[in-house]
Amino acid sequence: MKRTTALTTGLTLAIALTGVLGLSACGSDDGGSGSGTSAEEQAATESDIAEDLENARVAVADALAEDDSWAQIMLASDVQAPTVKYGLLVVPYSFSDAADRIQGTVNIDGGKFTIDGDSAATGLTWQIDQDGTITEVTE
């Protein structure tokens, strides 16, 4: 069931991303006067891993709601329920094919944290904070 849901979600996101990229490639008629990335293009790019980042954020936030004393929480696909391993709280989490990587160990400082991940489609790195705000990570 989980695999079917992940595949369906991935396919839906791929179709939506293809449509958005197709429209943005054909829809511009400004003669090249634009500069930088538009908000729509950024939203389309981040959307490919937004669900993975949001799911990771929710997993960490749920764990902190149970016990906010943890300074680190590990996201791992090899556990079925939250458990303590290696001196860390390990919570179940798996990311979809849309992401090449989602940060495995999350540092928490006063309830604040960020989780970053790399898009499989674009190679760009995105970050989500405890409030759900997603931003592109630039060097």
Image: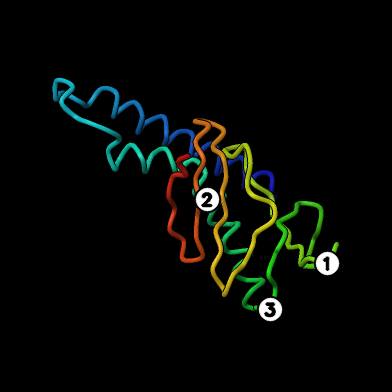
**Among the 4 quarters of the image, the one containing residue 56:** bottom right
Report helix, strand or loop for mark 1: loop
User: Nearer the N terminus, badge 3 or badge 2?
Assistant: 2
For disc 2, the neighbor class at 10 Å (few under 14, some 14 to 19, many from 20) is some
Q: Position of residue 27 (x, y in %)?
A: 22, 26
User: Nearer the N terminus, badge 2 or badge 1?
Assistant: 2
Q: Position of residue 35 (x, y in %)?
A: 22, 31
Label 3 sits on residue: 69
How far apart, in angstroms, are the residues tagged by discs 3 and 1? 13 Å
Determine the residue positioned at 56% across, 73% down: 111
Label 1 sits on residue: 87
- The three-letter code of the residue at mark 2 reads Glu
How far apart, in angstroms, are the residues tagged by discs 2 and 1? 28 Å
**Which numbered dot is residue 12?**
none
Q: Nearer the viewer, mark 2 or mark 1?
A: 1
Label 2 sits on residue: 51
Vertical position of residue 32 compared to residue 3: above or below: above
Tell me if 85 is positioned left or right of 118 in this view.
right
